[in-house]
Amino acid sequence: MDWLHGAQAVFLKDARLELRTRFALNALGLFVAAALVLLRFALGDTAVDAPTAAALLWIVIVFAATVGLGRAFVLEEERGTVLLLRLTLRPSAVYLGKLAFNVALTLALNAAAALVFLVLVAPAVHAPGLFAATLALGAIGLAGATTLLSAIIARTASSGPLLAVLSFPILIPLLFFAVQATRLAFEPGATWAAAETDLLGLVGYGGVMITASVLLFDYVWRD
Amino acid sequence: MPTPDRDTLILPRYGVGWRVFTIVAAVWMTVVLCLGFLGQIAKLPILEHSARNLYFHVPMWFVLMIGFLLTGYHSLRYLTTGRRLHDVRAEQAAVVATVFGVLGFITGTIWARFTWYAGTNVWWNADPRQVMVVIQLLICGAYFVLRGALEDERLQARLAAVYALFALTTMPFLLYVLPRRMASLHPGAEGNPAFSEMDIAPEMRWVFYAAVIGFFLLFGWIYTLRVRIRAAELRLAERRQDPLTV
Amino acid sequence: MQAALDTLTTARDTTIALLDTAAAQAVATQQPEGLDRIMLADDKLPVVLAVVLVIWIGLLFLLFRTDRRISRLERELKD
């Protein structure tokens, strides 16, 4: 129980700090909005079909996530609170707290991206439930893959574009499943059964990434 | 994790056994080259003589995979034992595997250009195997970038090991996803059974196996040389730091 | 006269196309051009040569790099 309390405390601390300044939420929201407006301008009045729309949406989400999710551990380093966390909590508790916060952040990001995308690019959503489920599972996978990597880059001298370099090759399976499921949701006659393997793939990807992260986080965290 | 100390860098002696290994590898590869050009092959349309590339191109891809698995194995051993030699081995396996991977990528592109895409002037067609190799090379590239971004030697070794293992966990997904998501002309894809040449000419199978073993021997040779050099460099740097204790 | 010559040329081309099945299959009876002409000759044997050469050059590259590192190591040992 102690352990879960620790994770909860980390999550609540991050959430409270975030709600005080709303820095990450604002930055991510603006990033997504600006990227999609640029996309709309670049497209002109070209009609976008389902596969292209799915691909564009997820590219924007993945880029936004690699820009916005890198701060979880960098902030602790900057504030000098790493040592305190290290002393008071078990590594897995820290990881779970940070993961929960990143999942929440990514869910917000995906919701914002989807809303702006629906307004600006206006694909026909034939299966809203499937679309929402894909966005939610995609958020868990994204956060699961990037949280450990953001802990890694927090220990480097210059974190700059490193998170993107490290995470893109790892995110490719996620991108495949998510784009496929989203494409199905955008096509007429969409059914949950058709997207079953993709949704299962997203669940499996998230599960494997989080399990591997919990096992490996110890080595990144300790000094 | 135990504190890494300098004697964890000491390599086994490379004596007579090693000399025998190098001679076997050299002779073996020479024989494979000869067999590859002179042996019987199944004459198929489109492939024709280029079917001989089976012996030279396919093992590159095997070496890339096994080489990166070796990186994963030594990364795991580094994390559990803290012996610096495992870190050296992990890094050098990744270096040599990357070179073989790049070769596999180039040779595969050339081969495809003059068989599947002959006369169309297409070099790149996003075939799943091509994409797969590119992803693997991107992972190797990210691994080296991460190593370069970390100054502290121990931290570099530990985080690189974590990244290698983390990247390896995505492999099953890639192996599952890619062939199903993209149409392929590559042997092994649906309706295009792997190595159909070998069913027609069984003797090709033996040359192919010999070629795979031969390239593994070559990989082992180059990899061992690089491990020895890297270990020597590190020990020299150590000696410079405190000349009295060594 | 010209017509007869044309027929003859066509007949020759057909014969070549029939004999040279490699070219015929590779580029639907079209004469290959440029790079294809070199690479598709002799039943595509040059493709094998290109592949083996690429591998050889790659291994040479590794060899040179390794050589340089040994030289550096030796220089440091001398200091």
Image (spheres, helix red, strand yellow):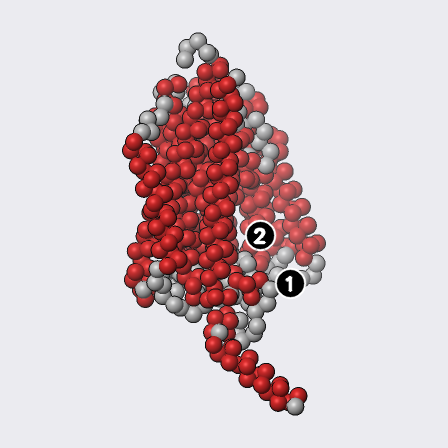
Compared to A98, does B204 lie above or below? below
Q: Amino acid at mark 2?
A: Leu
Where is residue A146? Give x, y as percent.
49, 38
- Most foreground residue, B68 or C7: C7
- Most foreground residue, A220 or B123: B123
Q: Residue at x 38, y 27 (%)?
A: B85
Q: Amino acid at mark 1?
A: Ala
Q: Chain of mark 1?
A: A
* Total number of numbered discs in the rendering: 2
| Residue at the top extreme, as displayed | B244
Compared to B185, does A156 lie above or below? above
Where is residue B202? Give x, y as percent.
29, 62
Pointers 1 and 2 in contact (CB under 8 A)?
no
Where is residue A46? Give x, y as percent.
67, 62
- Mark 2 closeness class: few <14, some 14–19, many ≥20 residues within 10 Å: many
Q: Residue at x 29, y 31 (%)?
A: B16
Q: Which residue is mark 2?
A: A57
Where is residue A152? Give x, y as percent.
49, 31
The lab-note entry on whether marks 1 and 2 share a chain reads yes
Q: Which residue is mark 1?
A: A47
Whole-number angstrom distance, CA of label 1 to CA of label 2: 15 Å
Q: Residue at x 29, y 33 (%)?
A: B17
